[in-house]
Image (tube, helix red, strand yellow):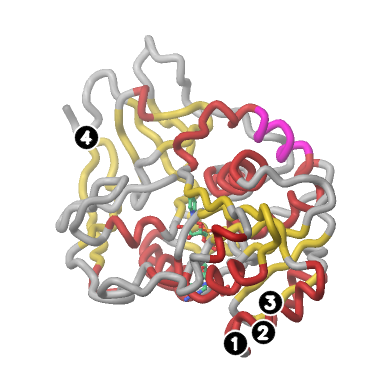
Amino acid sequence: MRDLVRATEIHLVRRPQGPPVPGDFATVARGIEVSPGEILVRNAFLSVDPYMRGRMNDGPSYVPPYQVGRVMDGGAIGRVIAAPPDSKLRPGQVVLHNLGWRDFATGPEAAFRALEPRPGLSLSTYLGALGMPGLTAYVGLLDVARLQSGEVVFVSGAAGAVGSVVGQLAKLHGAGRVIGSAGSDAKVEHLLRDLHFDAAFNYKRGPVLQLLAEAAGDTGIDVYFDNVGGDQLEAALSLLNVHGRVAMCGAVSRYNAAGPMPGPNNLGLAVGKRLRLEGFLVGDHGPRRGAFLSEVGEALSEGRLRADESVVDGIENMPGAFIGMLRGDNVGKMVVRVGA
Ligand code: NAP
């Protein structure tokens, strides 16, 4: 064992009550030790994701909580610096892994997934539109909601990492009309002008049911891709057509809540309208990655789909990027550049 490099990590030092604040994190420098047989990777981009807020709480969930005093791990992409002679990974190889919130990562070969990036795309795309959020959009829209040609789609969080891919994919798959909601007028303008949504509204500008009803007109909606929960889910339930489907992807409007939040007060509508509400986790859909990478990769390369990103520089700004993402500072995928 020997010190190879000074690495910087971001640790959780306190569990937040409500929205996270900078004092919940610490930037820690330490020497990286590479054990025999392990890979050393220099990270290029790190991901900040809403699910990480849930991992900061101490309680049962589908992913274990972060430990106080330990690094907060998460999605990352980088290049191999050193590998044992019998490894399939060679220096320079691009790898995806889950050892983020640090600039250098070490681990066994099984912790890293090699990939051949498409020419012309930033590596960060593999944390966003061509990564976990993109796959979430793909399987949620096509496999869970089972979008049919001509249908009306509503997606909340539409200017974010998942939502921006949902809306664009829906258009590419022949949706009759795509409606998006977002938290600022500038994001709404972006959805209409750059992502070619048919209608969009700022959910902060009035009662959501009224805003959604105006956007949907008299067609109602057939598919609701729910990224936020709360009053947007309630409004969608009111306006869904018979046999409508809800892909329950996340409830970011609730992640900072200190206690239990009320559910929609109109869930009973699901019976008469024969609605299907289905929660899903992207981790269950690995077998679809090949089809996803091929279809969405081609659409990106040919300019039929945009990979929006908000890039923050410097690992020390990781907590700020995360806090900012949760309050809506990002357009598209929020990533932190650490070594690209
Ligand atoms: P994102 O949309 O890129 O970023 C989070 C966004 O949440 C912010 O930009 C903000 O946009 C919005 N937001 C914050 N507070 C809100 C509130 N009170 N009401 C409405 N919107 C609010 O994040 P993402 O990575 O694409 O994730 C979107 C959703 O998908 C999250 O719920 C996440 O947990 C979920 N997800 C689920 C899976 C799965 O496997 N099921 C996988 C990935 C992600 P505005 O400016 O528009 O408010």
Q: CA distance from mark 3 to mark 2?
A: 6 Å
The residue carrying mark 3 has its beta carbon less than 8 Å from ligand 1? no
Say which mark, if any, is on residue 212. 3
Q: Position of residue 166 (x, y in %)?
A: 67, 54
- Report whether 9 appears left or right of 163: left
Say which mark, if any, is on residue 207. 1
Residues at badges 2 and 1 in contact (C-beta under 8 Å)?
yes
Q: CA distance from mark 4 to mark 2?
A: 58 Å
Identity of the residue furthest to the bottom in this view: 206
Q: Amino acid at mark 2?
A: Gln
Residue bearing mark 4: 33
* Mark 2 residue crowding within 10 angstroms, few (<14) / some (14–19) / many (20+): few
* Mark closest to the chain's N terminus, 4 or 3: 4
* Mark closest to the chain's N terminus, 1 or 3: 1
- Of the two numbered discs 4 and 1 in the rendering, the one whose residue sits closer to the viewer: 1
* Mark closest to the chain's N terminus, 4 or 2: 4
The residue carrying mark 1 has its beta carbon less than 8 Å from ligand 1? no
Residue bearing mark 2: 210
User: With respect to residue 284, does 149 lie above or below?
Assistant: below
Residues at badges 4 and 3 in contact (C-beta under 8 Å)?
no
Q: Nearer the viewer, residue 266 or 318?
A: 266
Magenta segment's dominant SS is: helix
Which contiguous range is marked in magenta? 291-298
* Mark 4 residue crowding within 10 angstroms, few (<14) / some (14–19) / many (20+): some
* Mark 1 residue crowding within 10 angstroms, few (<14) / some (14–19) / many (20+): few
Which type of secondary structure does the marked residue at label 1 adopt?
Answer: loop
Q: CA distance from mark 1 to mark 3?
A: 9 Å
Q: Amino acid at mark 4?
A: Glu
Which residue is at 18% across, 31% downward? 2
